[in-house]
């Protein structure tokens, strides 16, 4: 039994889901390949919440707060060290911020990250959960789908998740966000090729693959406001 089969048995997906994203375009926008299990998850479930609590970021979501291809993942990565250093007693980080890619959030403000190591083997990425960019951290040595199966079946206990998360039968609730924000949903995603070409022409040292630093994205936006 695959982990996705186990998850759909625990938490049936909606009867109707939006069309699957253009995954090659999404990966070009991000500058990295994505785990196959995540792509299968999004294709099967679409936008929504698991147990009314866990929301996965979606490619080109109408809200930047849930947009995998928007500014949030890079913004959060940049804030992790800032929050740690601002603490009276800075804690040890279990993972380097540059190896963390945010891909989900909970109703309590806990963030879900991929630990993107090895960088070129996304199907081996594991999952890290963090409480509002502060300690503690919880690391799950498996894929995102395996993580969801473990949490929703009660075999994995995430310290920062509520104790009564599974008091009711696990369910997936589709999101209605798209229909409520038609203007934002109409936004056209920007290919990273254009940003990379602009960055290289303007003196930035930017490799052909990998995530584009948020400061370069913001600089490109200032030069290309439309």
Image (tube, grey):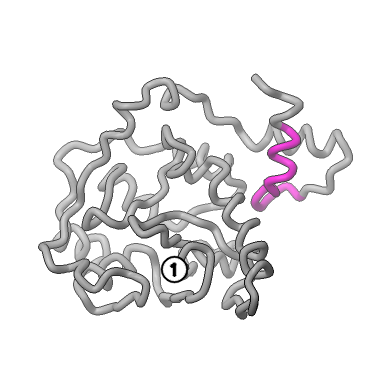
- Residue 54 visible in the snapshot: yes
Q: In which quarter of the image is the N terminus?
A: bottom left
Circle 1 packing at 10 Å, graded few (<14), some (14-19), many (20+), is many
Q: Percent from the top left, x then y, of residue 126?
A: 46, 70
Q: Mark 1 points at which residue?
A: 129
Image location of residue 152, percent across then percent down = 22, 67
When asked about the image quadrant of residue 15, the answer is top left
Foreground residue among 79 and 43: 79
Q: Residue at x 61, y 50 (%)?
A: 74
Where's residue 203, x and y in %?
Answer: 88, 40
Is 140 displayed left or right of 44 in the figure? right
Q: Does the magenta stretch include residue 28?
A: no
Q: Residue shown at 20%/47% (left/top)?
A: 173
Residue 143's x, y, as percent? 39, 67
Q: Nearer the viewer, residue 12 or 73?
A: 73
Q: Residue at x 18, y 57 (%)?
A: 8
How many marks the image carries: the answer is 1
The reply to whether residue 37 is in sight is: no
The C terminus - image quarter = top right
Q: Give the range drawn in magenta.
A: 207-220
- Asked if residue 213 is among those painted magenta in the image, a careful observer would answer yes
């Amino acid at each position: 039994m695959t982990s996705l089969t186990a998850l759909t048995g625990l938490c049936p997906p909606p009867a109707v889901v939006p069309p699957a994203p253009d995954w090659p375009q999404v990966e070009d926008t991000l500058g990295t390949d994505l785990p196959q299990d995540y792509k299968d998850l999004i294709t099967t479930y679409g936008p929504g919440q698991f147990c009314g609590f866990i929301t996965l970021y979606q490619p080109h979501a109408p809200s930047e707060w849930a947009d995998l291809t928007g500014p949030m993942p890079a913004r959060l990565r940049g804030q992790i060290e800032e929050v740690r250093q601002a603490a009276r007693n800075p804690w040890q980080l279990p993972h380097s911020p540059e190896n963390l890619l945010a891909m989900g959030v909970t109703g309590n403000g806990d963030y879900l990250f991929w630990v993107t190591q090895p960088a070129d083997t996304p199907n081996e990425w594991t999952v890290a959960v963090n409480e509002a960019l502060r300690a503690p951290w919880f690391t799950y040595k498996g894929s995102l789908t395996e993580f969801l199966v473990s949490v929703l079946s009660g075999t994995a206990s995430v310290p920062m998740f509520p104790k009564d998360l599974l008091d009711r039968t696990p369910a997936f609730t589709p999101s209605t966000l798209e229909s409520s924000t038609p203007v934002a949903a109409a936004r056209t995603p920007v290919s990273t090729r254009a940003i990379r070409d602009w960055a290289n022409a303007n003196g930035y040292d930017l490799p052909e693959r990998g995530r584009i630093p948020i400061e370069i994205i913001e600089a490109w936006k200032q030069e290309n406001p439309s």
